[in-house]
Image (cartoon, rainbow, N blue to C red):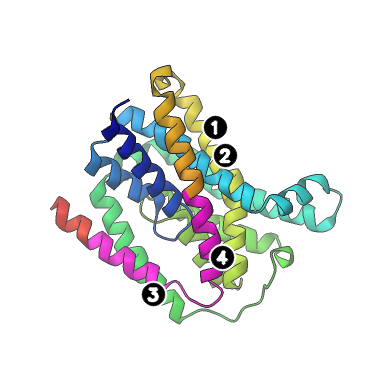
Amino acid sequence: MDLLLILKTIIMGIVEGATEFLPISSTGHLIIAGDVLGFLTKDKRDVFEIIIQLGAILAVVWQYRTKVLHVTTNLSEPKSQQLILNLFIAFLPLAIIGLAFHHQIKALLFNPKSVAIALIIGGFIILWIEKKLPKVSVTSVDDMDWKHAVKIGFAQAIALIPGASRAASTIIGGMVFGLSRTVATEFSFFLAIPVMFAATAYDLYKSKGLLASDDVWVFLIGFITAFIAALVVIKVLIRYIANHNFAIFAWYRIAFGALVLFYYW
């Protein structure tokens, strides 16, 4: 494997890990980065992105390993049951809508221009919501009920549009529905576990014919890089939201989206 391919692989892994859990759209950034770098063929790049997304989600599992282990080994506890139920309910809208319209969305919207427009629109929405936030009514993930989960689930479905951002949809959506900034972020992390595992399994099954032994090292380097980058970002984001809002990410979305539109037009 040549050094240039290794460098491109590391860059793609960092892009995935650094953007997956920030409200700036990892899918959008991967589409743009892959296009600019000329990284692999389109089909192999799709498989590569699936693999590195798995690396990013494992970073969440590792960061919250104590909570995850407690919930999975104490299923008789009401709080554990409620969290699992909430995650299942919040997962359903994305799964149903995604299965129904996956191919149409991918064919029509998976391109740099669509991503840029979604980034810009999402940025202005975040700025507007930050000024209109309701009073916080939920200060712990354990205090959420199924109604919160339903609302966040439909908010998450917006992330099927590349550039919208799953993290932005769930975190900002959660805040709109009364969750504290910290609770919305933590629930977004937890919700990413079933969502991304399911998406990875589905996409790998659909793309199994594209897997080749020659690509193992590319996938492995990207996987490890994404895991490390995501772990760093999760830790930093948790500390950041304690004293800051998401306006900086909104302005980044707007500026980056405008730059992408300028570049491709």
Q: Amino acid at mark 4?
A: Ile
- Which amino acid, by three-letter code, is at mark 1? Ala
Q: Are marks 1 and 2 in contact (CB under 8 Å)?
A: yes
Which contiguous range is marked in magenta? 229-258
Q: Which residue is drawn at the image coordinates 56% and 74% (left, top)?
A: 242
Q: Is residue 26 left or right of residue 31?
A: right
Left or right of 90, for residue 77: right
Q: Label 3 is placed on what type of residue?
A: Leu
Residue 165 in the image: state x and y as whole percent.
42, 55
Q: Secondary structure at mark 4?
A: helix
Residue at mark 1 to residue at mark 4: CA–CA distance: 28 Å
Q: Which residue in the protein does label 1 denote?
A: 201
Name, please, the residue furthest toward the front.
3
Residue labelled with disc 2: 197
Say which amino acid is labelled 2.
Phe
In front: mark 4 or mark 2? 4
Quadrant location of the N terminus? Answer: top left
Residue 136 seen by the camera? yes
